Image (cartoon, grey):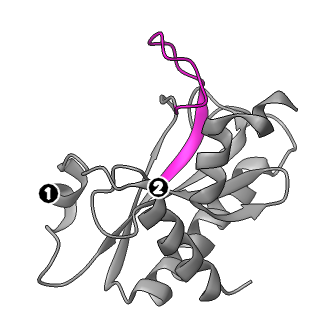
Amino acid sequence: MAEENSAEFNERKRRTIREFGSYAFAILDTNPKSFGHALVISTMPYNDITDHLEEESDQRTKVLEAAIQTASNLKNALKAEKIYMMTMCHHYEMWETRDGTTTEHLHFHLVPYYEGVSEKGEELLALHGTHVDEDRLQELAERIKVNTKN
C-alpha cells in the first residue's frame, strides 16, 4: 500500500500505542491537552457516533472497548488520577486531505488528568494543545506499550 511508505504514515506509526485488529488503533496526539493525550480511531467511516445502528456489526462497540482499555493503560502507565474521554467524527490528520475536507471517522480523545498539574474537567478539554515533537511522542508511546495490559 502506498500509504505505508509515506512519511506521514511512518510518523503516525511512531506514535502508535496499540492496534486493535482491523477495527481501531490508538495513537498519541501531536498537540496534547495534557501529558499522554491519546486518540483511539476507528478504521470504519462514521459521520456520527449513531451511524450504523441498524447493522448487526459490533464495530462501534469494539472501538469503545478499545478506548476504555487504552484509557486504563494510560492511567496505569502514566499514573494519571483520571482519564477524560470525548468523541468526535469530524477531523483530518496529516495523512488525509489538507483542503479543508475531512474524513469522517469515529475517534475518542483520551485526556489524562493529573491532580495539581492539569486543569479540571471542561477547562482541560477546552485547552488548545501544545505541539510535541515526534521523538518525544515515540518515547512516550514505547513507555505506554511496556505498561499495556492485553
In the picture, measured across the screen, residue 57 lies left or right of residue 20, that is right
Q: Is residue 54 above or below residue 12?
A: above
Residue 137 x %, y %: 46, 63
Give the residue pinned by disc 1: 123
Q: State which quadrant residue 120 falls in.
A: bottom left
Q: Residue at x 47, y 9 (%)?
A: 99
Cα–Cα span, label 2 and label 1: 26 Å
SS majority, magenta: loop
Q: Is residue 85 left or right of residue 7?
A: left
State the SS at label 2.
helix
The magenta-colored residue range is 93-108
Whether residue 119 appears in magenta in the rendering, the answer is no
**Three-letter code, disc 1:** Glu
The answer to whether residue 41 is seen in the rendering is no
Side of 115 relative to 146 (left or right): left
Q: Which residue is located at x 55 percent, y 70 percent? A: 141
Image location (x, y in percent) of residue 128 = 21, 46
Q: Would you call the spot at circle 1 few (<14 residues within 10 Å), some (14-19), or many (20 or more)?
A: few
Q: Residues within 10 Å of mark 2 (few under 14, many from 20)?
A: some
Is 113 on the left-hand or right-hand side of 90? left
Q: Amino acid at mark 2?
A: Glu
Q: Residue at x 49, y 87 (%)?
A: 77
Q: Which residue is mark 2?
A: 134
Query: Toward the viewer: 38 or 94?
Result: 94
**Residue 63, quarter of picture:** bottom right
> Where's the N terminus, which quadrant?
top right
Q: Considering only order in the chain, which callout, 1 or 2, is on the residue closer to the N terminus?
A: 1
